[in-house]
Image: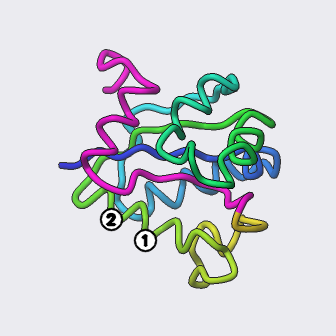
Amino acid sequence: MEQTLSIIKPDAVAKNVIGKILTRFEDAGLRIAVTKKIQLSREDAKAFYAVHKDRPFFNDLVEFMISGPVVVSVLEGDNAVAKNRELMGATNPKDAQKGTIRADFAESIDANAVHGSDSLENAKIEIEFFFAQREIV
């Protein structure tokens, strides 16, 4: 059984679609091992997205991620990383297949509703960033 990290971003939290997004994960066979609503600090956002620090969109991404609360979750299940990425859809909601989270809830490539780990290795790192092992049940 795999674990992956999901973040419901500030735009989707502001739209009050947290429950709708979490339901999609469960309906697809993923189990929510832990979830919490938090407000990222600037330092948190910079550290989490440090891999993008040299890219031109980094500062805008940090500003967006601290613009409101986010919901972070650990999802579990068979092929959890791939299944979550399939449910999310393409990064740009204009390219996302109908019925995916981004097609249904995202506004733009920047305000794209959700984040999901892109590999098992990154899932482990990202999960440890937000959760202590004792929190994941």
Q: Residue at x 73, y 52 (%)?
A: 12
Query: Disc 2, disc 1: CB below 8 Å?
Result: yes
**Separation of residues labelled 2 and 1 (CA atoms):** 6 Å
Looking at the picture, how far across and down is residue 94, in whole percent?
A: 69, 81
Reply above or below: 17 against 34: below
Q: Amino acid at mark 2?
A: Ala
Tell me if mark 2 has few (under 14), some (14-19) or many (20+) residues whose alpha carbon lies within 10 angstroms of its own. some
**From the viewer's perspective, is 16 left or right of 82?**
right
The stretch of residues the image draws in magenta is 110-137
| Disc sitting over residue 82 in the figure | 2
Instruction: Tell me if residue 116 is in the magenta stretch.
Output: yes
Looking at the picture, how far across and down is residue 137, in whole percent?
A: 31, 26
What is the secondary structure assignment of the residue under circle 1? helix
Q: Which residue is mark 1?
A: 86
Judging depth in this view, the residue of 87 and 93 nearest the camera is 93
Reply above or below: 73 against 89: above
